[in-house]
Amino acid sequence: MYYYLPQPPYFLLIVGLFTGITCGLAFEASLKLTLKQWSKQSSSKSIEELRAFKVGFPFVGICVGVCVFLASGLQIFSLDVWLSYGISLLMTIFIGGLVWYQLGNLFLQLQRGGSRELDLDAFEL
């Protein structure tokens, strides 16, 4: 009787890492551009418009890349395909949701008080 060991998905590991990094760079560029445009026209636009397609689409790309990367990493350690994608999908949705929520809070703080509101050195312990 032969025992078959599946080949670990090294290619998907690299693809997930590449997707996450490239979408992260696109997210950074679009966020900087959108914030620069908002600061020039802060009276006419709401900060909620920043959470639109230009910023959200690269963020979803980051989440997909991270999910594939995590699932491939778990498969390398001999977990089943369904189990590894289930675990990584739950982790990615949870952590991505927390990051998106925090980003929204930062946008609201920026709208309320400008960049002075985000000064982290002003906090005293």
Image (cartoon, grey):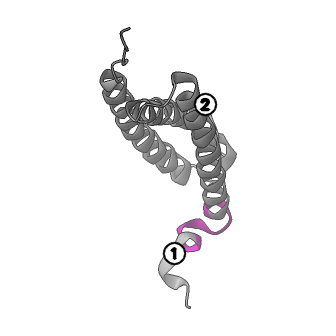
Mark number, residue 15: none
Q: Give left or right: position of 119 versus 20.
A: right
Q: Nearer the viewer, residue 34 or 16?
A: 16
Judged from the image, the secondary structure of the residue bearing numbered disc 2 is: helix
Q: Measuring from the top left, give residue 117's x and y in whole percent.
A: 59, 72
What residue is pinned by disc 1?
119
**Farthest-out residue, bottom:** 125
Residue at image point 62% right, 35% down:
52
Kindly report the distance in space between the C-alpha atoms of the residues bearing marks 1 and 2. Answer: 39 Å
What residue is pinned by disc 2?
86
Q: Amino acid at mark 2?
A: Gly
Q: Nearer the viewer, residue 10 or 32?
A: 10
Q: Nearer the viewer, residue 2 or 97?
A: 2
Residue at image point 48% right, 44% down:
31
On whether residue 47 falls in the magenta region, the answer is no
Q: Give left or right: position of 1 versus 102.
A: left
Q: Give the class, few, some or many, for how many residues have Cα within 10 Å of label 2's Cα (few <14, many ≥20).
A: some
Q: Is residue 95 above or below residue 64?
A: below
Q: Which range of residues does the magenta coloring cover?
A: 110-117
Q: How many marks?
A: 2
Q: Measuring from the top left, give residue 19's x and y in whole percent.
A: 38, 29
Residue at image point 51% right, 75% down:
119
